[in-house]
Structures are given as C-alpha cells and as structure tokens.
Amino acid sequence: FRSREFEQMEIEFFCRPDDSRKWYQFWRDRRWQWYLNLGLTEGRLQLREHHEAELAHYSCGTADIEYAFPFLADGEYGELEGIAHRGDFDLRSHMEGKLVREDGKLVLETDSNGKPKHRGSGRDLSYFDDVTRERFVPHVIEPSAGADRAVLAFLCDAYHEDNVPDEKGNPRERTVLKLHPRLAPLKAAILPLVKKDGMPEVAADLYKKIKKRMPCMYDAKGSVGRRYARQDEAGTPWCITIDGQTMKDQTVTLRDRDSLNQERVPIEECAELLTERLL
C-alpha cells in the first residue's frame, strides 16, 4: 500500500565495526519497543529478520517491524519500519565509488578495463580513536520508518466500537479512539455540567491552567453524555466535569476514556495529576 507522498523517519547511527552487531540488535529491539510503548498491540506486530537471500547487497543484516493491518488478508503484515546493518558500505562508497558484493565481500565495481565505473570523492572518511589509537571506517546502523504508516497503524489499533450506558442507563453504541495519551491530539476536555450556577467560570479557569501544560479544550455544547461521546471519538483520554459538587467542595469528576471509571479529585490537583499520567 503505497502513496504518492510519504514522510520518512531515519537515523544514521555510526559505530565501531567490532561493536556493530551489538548496536544493530540494540536499535532493532529499541525500535520494536517504541511501537509497544505507544500502544500498538503486540499480537498484531511481528519482528522479521531477513533471510540471507533477501538481503540487499550492502546489508549485513536487516529486520522489518510489521503490523497486521485490518485491511490485509489474515496472516499478512505490512511493513512499518526496517532496521538495516549497512556495514561500511555508505562511507566506503563515498570514498571509493560504487561497490558491489562478490563472494561475500564488497568490492569496487569496475568496467571492462578494470577502472572504477563510478568514482568516489577520494576523501578519507575513516575515524581515528584517540583512546585505542585505532583507525577504522565506521559501520552504519539505519532504522528507517514510515511516519505515515505508523500513524495509520496507531489509528487502526486504537479504533474500537463498544456499548456503554447512556444518561438513562440504556446501552448506547460508542465509537472510541483508544490512542495512547501521548499520541492523543487533545489530552483533556473540561466540561461544565450546565451553563449556569458559576460552573462555566470555574471550568474556564481550570481550562486556562491545564492549557499551559498540555493541549486541551473547553466544551460546553450539548448534554454531558454527548460531549463525552465527542471526546471518545476524538481519542481524548480524560474528561473533567465541573458539577454541583464542585461548587461545594472544589472537587471535579475525572472520567477515563477507556475504562469509563470516574473519580473525584481536588480541582487544584487536576493539572499535576494529568501531567503525571502522561509520563
């Protein structure tokens, strides 16, 4: 599944040749964990090492992180990211010219006269280690991820439909984006229960305080149930409701998007509490 344009995220990590296998495993595992930490379901992910026949001519090892997108057939996965151990191919190519692999080794590609087909810069790109007194051409580990595909995977994984009780206790179909809080466009919504009795003013003041720390919104339109539903669809992790109890004891209702649990917390602790839960 390709698009005309795409955004790519890449790292070029340079390391000592004798440590390169260790760093390749480090970046492979770290990138895998990145997707898990941001909420992708592990059962829909796979880390696939390329077989030797699959490897590009420059590669000493490549692993793909793949996701079982719902629009693919059962058992099929789409690539999210590749982590490549590129050896010294990149820097040697800059220095010497175009390289090809022969008998397991990278050699300079030559024409029929034995001359390089594509010349390099001739510049010495080796590195001298002052501690070990060694000179070497660094190896490169390259994680390369499709930002667009990652976003699509996060959206697919987060999309859920379930049933929740409405304001009268009757089951109501709900569409909810269970995005990881760090990915949610809005972290919280501040809702006055009604547009009177001082609740809008208290809600507006709380909104200003929380807005200084994280993206949030003030929402006073419609019933509180409809407002909850809107925020669930947008993936907002928490809703804070200012109600009659707030006006008595300065506590608010903090509602969790995924569990639907509601708890009373002091209004002065809201901003700090949400900040802690985002970490």
Image: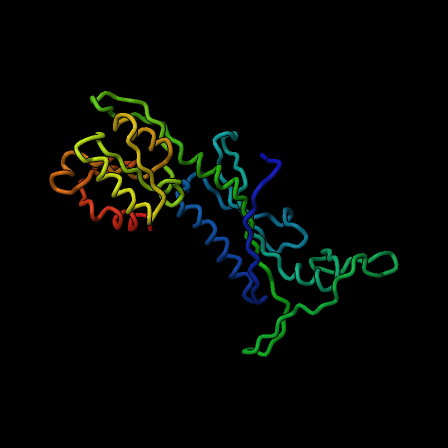
Q: Judge by depth and name the residue closer to the eye, 258 or 89.
A: 258
Judged left or right of residue 111, residue 140 is left
Image coordinates of residue 126 in percent, x first then y, are 65, 69
Identify which residue, 136 or 223, lies in the foreground: 223
Give the residue drawn at x 52%, y 40%.
Answer: 148
Whole-percent x and y of residue 28? 50, 53
Q: Is residue 63 visible?
A: no
Q: Is 204 rendered above or below residue 10?
A: above
Hey, which quadrant is residue 231 in on the image?
top left
Nearer the observer, 170 or 69: 170
Q: Residue at x 65, y 50 (%)?
A: 56
**Position of 62 compared to 272: left or right?**
right
- Tell me how the rendering is colored: rainbow
Task: Give the side of residue 260 with respect to residue 70, left or right.
Answer: left
Q: Residue at x 38, y 39 (%)?
A: 179
Number of labels in the image equals 0
| The image quarter in which residue 242 lies | top left
Q: Is residue 178 visible?
A: yes
Q: Residue at x 54, y 52 (%)?
A: 143
Residue 157 percent coordinates (x, y): 42, 36
Percent across and percent down for residue 36 are 41, 46
Above or below, comparing residue 125 to residue 153 in the picture:
below
Most extreme residue toward the left, as rendered? 248
For this rendering, which residue is in front, 44 or 149?
A: 149
Q: Quadrant of the N terminus?
A: top right
